[in-house]
Image: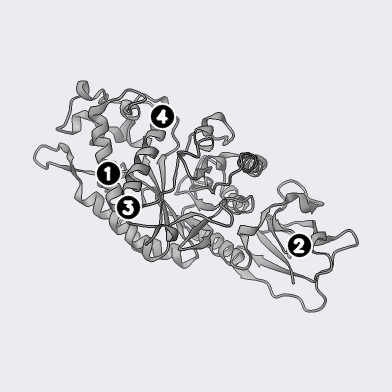
Amino acid sequence: MDNDARIRPYDANPFYWQYKGKPVLLLGGSVEDNLFQIPNIQEHLDLLHSVGGNYVRCTMSSRDPGDAWPFERDPATGLYDLEQPGEEYWRRLRRFLELCLERDIIAQFEMWDRFDFARAPWQDNPYNPKNNVNYTAEESGLQEAIDTHPGQRESAFFRTVPALENNTLLLRFQQQQVDQMLSISLAFPNTLYCMDNETNEDPEWPWYWARYIREKADAAGVNVQLTEMWDHHNILDDEHRATFEHPEIFDFCDVSQNNHSPAREHWENPLALRKRFLDAGRRWPMNSVKIYGANSGAYGSTRDAQERFWRQVFVGLASSRFHRPPAGLGLGEIPQAHIRSLRMFTDEMDITTCTPHNDLLGNRSWNEAYCTANPGTEYALFFPDGGDVRLDVSAAAGRPLRLRWLDIRAGRWLPEPSGDAPTPDDAGLLRVATPAEEGYWAALVQAR
């Protein structure tokens, strides 16, 4: 497949993606982070595809029971050889990518997951000096025990690159692992690459790997899409500038950490970031590969997750995916309903020509309704729990309007009432009131 058919920013509006030459909105949810490692991967991807999903997250992680590690292990000694790729690990990756490709599912990878390199998972990790035949703790500079949260940055694993500690011994094995992955993944057009899972390491670390991957991809004649995911929950914090202000290194941004924010900031922070991009004369896809929120977790409620899923699409993000349980809703019945409904809804409009437009809403209380619109042509509204607002449709003056309602939880369009078309008042304001006082609703107003 040539580069034009690969996943890349949409030519007509680079705030969105295109795949196989056509614009695509990425929607998803899945049961696990390192999805290629789960045993029932085909059934899980079939379920996602059946409800209109086309987007998954995949960390290159191995810390869960039953996971394979990326290196072979001598059964006699129990030690790994970092010179020998793990056959089962890489077989699982290839099969995962083949299954995604068959279903037009985009996989966003995270090359390094810091939680594999501290506390209990570090005790089983092949890179731990006590677990391999390739180096000692003294030779590698790696501690055999790291008991703190990886955010404390005790591991020298993330300082090997030339601009930091220039640990050539360890860096060589890291490069070999990345090379092995790219030898498989570069052949697939449905891949996005993120350097880390919510890191707070020195920016030189992800900058090195982004440049390294691009160099390898260029040599193979492949265009790749690269980003980084930072740890700070406020996406406007200076930590995130290491991605946003470096278009010579990265191609898109992941704003998943914004899903820690309450409703107001959840909407306003991406708007502020969007303005930064426009002021700088560029447009980038903004992805959200993990939506936190579940009554079983600590990062928002089940209701928060459902609102966030729709809200971030209406604020102009290019992707929206439910995080795995227990911190997210995964691909249970609730996420299935929302993915199905949002796909039904956006299939009836052109989301790529719309921009966030809460300024068009009157009589609106906070978090009552959200609007994205191509004024004069179409207007989309999302109501998290019923509502009654006034929509400024003056840009469509003189054109008859069509108003349709989607019952999000039921996944069905309501029958359109017979009779006259919806009519705005003399000021060009159209009353848009949900069919019921509560519930998740979406309204689509289009000029004929």
Q: Earlier in the sequence, mark 2 or mark 4?
A: 4
403 vs 6, nearest the viewer: 6
Tell me the element at label 1. Answer: helix
Q: Name the residue that disc number 2 marks.
A: 376
Q: Residues within 10 Å of mark 4 (few under 14, many from 20)?
A: some
Q: Earlier in the sequence, mark 4 or mark 1?
A: 1
Q: Residues within 10 Å of mark 2 (few under 14, many from 20)?
A: some
Q: Name the residue that disc number 4 marks.
A: 204
Q: Name the residue that disc number 1 marks.
A: 179
Q: Residues within 10 Å of mark 3 (few under 14, many from 20)?
A: some
Q: Earlier in the sequence, mark 1 or mark 2?
A: 1
148 vs 226, nearest the viewer: 226
Q: Earlier in the sequence, mark 3 or mark 2?
A: 3
Where is 69 relative to 371, above or below? above
Amino acid type at mark 4: Glu
Q: Residues within 10 Å of mark 1 (few under 14, many from 20)?
A: some
Q: Earlier in the sequence, mark 1 or mark 3?
A: 1
Spatial CA span between label 4 and label 1: 19 Å
